[in-house]
Image (tube, coloured by chain):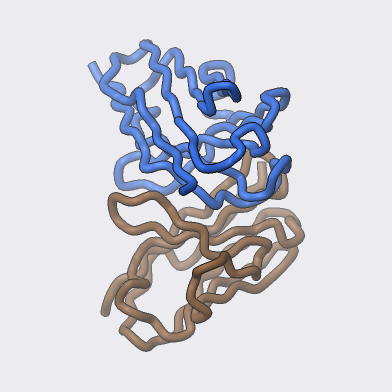
Chain colours: A blue, B brown
Amino acid sequence: EVQLLESGGGLVQPGGSLRLSCAASGFTFSSYAMSWVRQAPGKGLEWVSAISGSGGSTYYADSVKGRFTISRDNSKNTLYLQMNSLRAEDTAVYYCAKYWVPAAMFNAFDIWGQGTMVTVSS
Amino acid sequence: AIRITQSPSSLSASTGDRVTITCRASQGISSYLAWYQQKPGKAPKLLIYAASTLQSGVPSRFSGSGSGTDFTLTISCLQSEDFATYYCQQYYSYPHTFGQGTKLEIK
């Protein structure tokens, strides 16, 4: 079964850091680009970042550029999101998502994790 | 960045109704558009990709159309399990922006 499982969320103070992880199983992880999408409480979906299967290409939303870093370890089938200089407006459920076409970064997300909550508050 | 304007933001309908949700892109995106369904407390679920291709396992009462800048999601005969929030997303260029969402409620 194809599965994504996020972890690492929690409560952090403004200006703090957090690293999210997304463990993948049931597919050839290195063949697929991956992404992070977040959803603030009661709000809509916001695309955050994406990374190619090899890790050689990355993209970021303007709202997180320079503060967040996406990476992956294909030997561990794990996606990461390093979040620095966190702000109250980063409070959200963070989902990892798999692009459905192998080796392509311009397509839809067919598999989503269950999400992990990040709360930025003093 | 490409802006996606989704309408309406909310919609009340009854079981058996036909409903349509619209997304408009700020510039042409060919057919690089997906539709997702999200239920409370759950992750989104892919319904349609490439503007009109139904994802495997999605009921045929869902359909998508459009290309360029204007797109629609139609649910032909609402079932109780269809009451949820729907989002469109463009993946023509980064950032892969989402529409604001449409909450479909029972009348």
B107 w.r.t. A20: above or below: below
Q: Which residue lies most toward the bottom here?
A: B16
Residue ID at (33%, 51%): B42
**What percent of the width, then of the height, locates residue B34?**
59, 59
Residue ID at (61%, 51%): A108
A26 w.r.t. A55: above or below: below
Q: Quadrant of residue B55?
A: bottom right
The number of discs equals 0
Pick whichever, B106 or A77, lies toward us.
Answer: A77
**What percent of the width, then of the height, locates residue B56?**
56, 66
Residue ID at (60%, 72%): B64
B105 displayed left or right of B86: left
Q: Quadrant of residue A114?
A: top left
Pick whichever, A50 or A112, lies toward us.
Answer: A112
Q: Quadrant for the C terminus of chain A, please.
A: top left
Residue ID at (29%, 14%): A13
B93 displayed left or right of A35: right
Q: Quadrant of residue A75?
A: top right
Pick whichever, A86 or A57, lies toward us.
Answer: A57
**What percent of the width, then of the height, locates residue A34?**
59, 36
**What percent of the width, then of the height, locates residue B96?**
62, 44
